[in-house]
Image (cartoon, rainbow, N blue to C red):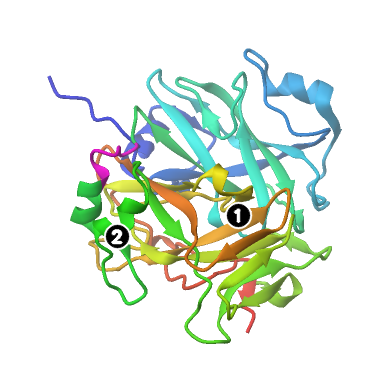
Amino acid sequence: MTEKKIGALPAQYIRKMFSEGEILNSDEKNIQPASIDLSVSEEGYRMKGTFLPKKSESIRDIIKSESIYKIDLNNPLEKNGVYLIRLNEKLNLSKGKFAFTSSKSSIGRIDLQTRLVVDGYSRFDGVPCGYKGELWLQIIPKSFLIKLNAGDKLNQIRFFNGEAKIGSADIREVYEKYKLIFDKSQNFIPVEEELTRNNRNNIVMTIELSGQDDNQIVGYKNLLVDQVVDLSKINYYDADEFFEPIISPKNGKLVLEKDSFYIFYTKEFIRIPKEFSSEMIAYDISNGEFRSHYAGFFDPGFGYGQDGEIKGRQAVLEVRSYDSNFVFRDGQPICQMSFENLIEPAEFVYGQKIGSNYVNQDGPKLSKYFKSEIK
């Protein structure tokens, strides 16, 4: 008897889910190396506030009691409003499959919070085993007004048939074999130096604030403006109308203001071989009340290429400080990377061949909606 492969499903297995009727109302062109992009429909509601459904409670039941009005996508979504949008896709998962979602990178970089909710499941961004039904996206614009269009792709979904995360017993072997982390000079960082920061199964990443010269931009901060970002307009907006640059501080530290939004990047250059996917997760909540990312998923091939020809790319960080101002120092731990086994290598990888937007990103890269960086 052939042993069942357990882990995250790559593109070729996701394609089978289309043909077997487990993914409905979608198109195979939305398949990424280890995920699919989900698209918004025209049906949406302004809600009284954020929520999670109780067991056996449908999203449509909640809409009846907790919505304020049905929205018109011709009008922008207001800052800090809570909106619920039905996604076009539906799922008809077999008993052994479940899923997780995350915002797409371009969406996280405009400070647009998206969280998936499904019927009868009291958890954001998760889909339970064997789920059959509609998918809904809770959307909260934080920095800018957002113009949505039917068909826009704000988040992505990954599928699993069992535990995929690489544990502490195996992460060192994977790290050394695939050489996962490099420095800015393209030198591999040995396992003793990188993994000993953390005695668990994740790789710790640190923030880059030093730059290579006195005038280098190490980040961006949102401007307090009532500007609209239309998600149909790519490479369109002038960045300096939405963000101000942050120049590398001479003392190596910055004060992040409460409730402001920042774009930073990591010192480390990470790469994801085609046998794995990866997720950015919080470093440690006891180290401060800040969020380091909204879009935490990394497809196979990011910073790696088809055959390991790329020696990593820096990860972009979407940061908010809560409760109070927060001081960041150059080289301070800011997030962790967990790795997941694919049940087999992805048949294609993140990169230029599939039109990936951030394959060559260098430094604090802004979202694809902006036509220029701030000089």
Q: Across the whole image, how many numbered discs are drawn on residues?
A: 2
Q: Position of residue 313 (x, y in %)?
A: 39, 66
Q: In what quadrant of the picture does the C terminus appear?
A: bottom right
Task: Identify which residue is drawn at 25% across, 53% down.
Answer: 175
- Can residue 101 be seen here? yes
Which residue occupies the foreground of this view, 102 or 371? 102
**Residue 39 occupies which quadrant of the picture?**
top right
Name above or below for residue 129 compared with residue 199.
above
Q: Position of residue 140 (x, y in %)?
A: 73, 45
Name above or below for residue 153 compared with residue 15.
below
**Residue 249 occupies which quadrant of the picture?**
bottom right
> CB of mark 1 within 8 Å of CB of mark 2?
no
Name above or below for residue 224 compared with residue 116.
below
Q: Residues within 10 Å of mark 1 (few under 14, many from 20)?
A: many
What is the three-letter code of the residue carrying label 2? Answer: Glu
The label on residue 193 is 2
Tell me, yes or no, whether the highlighted magenta stretch contains residue 237. Answer: no
Q: Which residues are magenta?
A: 165-171
Task: Identify which residue is drawn at 82% across, 50% down.
Answer: 78
The label on residue 309 is none
Q: Mark 1 vs mark 2: which is more N-terminal?
A: 1
Q: Image check: 190 left or right of 324?
A: left
The label on residue 108 is 1
Q: Position of residue 247 (x, y in %)?
A: 62, 79
Q: Position of residue 228 (x, y in %)?
A: 78, 62
Most common SS among magenta residues: loop
Residue that sits furthest to the front in the current view: 251
Which residue occupies the foreground of this view, 352 or 141? 141
